[in-house]
Image: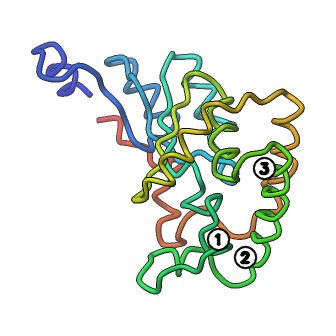
Amino acid sequence: MGELKKLVEEGKIKYIGLSEPSVDTVRRAHAIHPITALEMEYCLWTRDIEDDIIPVCRELGIGIVAYSPLGRGFFGGKAVLESLPSESILTTHPRFTGDNLEKNKLVYSRFANVAAKNSCSPPQLALAWLLHQGDDIIPIPGTTKIKNLDDNIGSLALKLTEENLKEICDAVPIEEVGGHSNYSYLSKYEYKYANTPTK
């Protein structure tokens, strides 16, 4: 952070952002130079950061760039409406395999019903839910298809009430999501454990 601060002071960079830091790292880094944003996984079926990262970011005035806002494509129908390509890394992801996938298909079905009730697609509703979590949270959905891009943009038009937001969360209860949000071999590197050394 000291080196990044120098780059800001020299005019070589304008802002500083961190990806997947622990709460302690955020606090220590922000004390050296204000952090503009954190990149964190955040979506309907991965909400861990609501308990620790989001409150700290709001306390310190740090934005959140939410990656995988569609649950690695799950809320767009990946592995539910369309099969995964054999070369996809998701074929080994805990939430996209075996009994976990079967369990998650039920979650998707419930969620798709809520989307239909709101006259929108499941991806639009998932993104709209995220956009309603606060102006300081910016989703970054990725796609290779123009139709998906257009669909994603449509989420901006959805206005959700508190009742809608509750219904959406009730359709995707975290305790009913099958499988861990990450590959088991990466779990020890998750943000909760990604504390940097003090020196």
Q: Are marks 2 and 1 in contact (CB under 8 Å)?
A: yes
Q: CA distance from mark 3 to mark 2?
A: 22 Å
Q: Are marks 3 and 2 in contact (CB under 8 Å)?
A: no
Left or right: where does residue 21 sit relative to residue 113?
left
Res. 95 mark: 1
Q: Position of residue 196 (x, y in %)?
A: 37, 42
Q: Position of residue 24 (x, y in %)?
A: 49, 33
Residue at (69, 85) in percent of width and height: 98
The image quadrant where one finds the N terminus is: top left
Residue at (28, 35) in percent of width and height: 199
Residue at (76, 78) in percent of width and height: 102
Q: Position of residue 161 (x, y in %)?
A: 83, 27
Q: Position of residue 160 (x, y in %)?
A: 77, 30
Res. 100 mark: 2
Does residue 80 sit above or below 141 in this rendering?
Answer: below
**Number of residues whose C-alpha sits closer than 10 Å to that of mark 3, classed few (under 14), some (14–19) or many (20 or more):** some
Q: Secondary structure at mark 2?
A: helix
Residue type pointed to by label 2 = Asn
Does residue 88 sit above or below 173 in this rendering?
Answer: below
**Number of residues whose C-alpha sits closer than 10 Å to that of mark 1, classed few (under 14), some (14–19) or many (20 or more):** many
Does residue 49 sit above or below 59 in this rendering?
Answer: below
Q: Secondary structure at mark 1?
A: helix
Q: Earlier in the sequence, mark 3 or mark 2?
A: 2
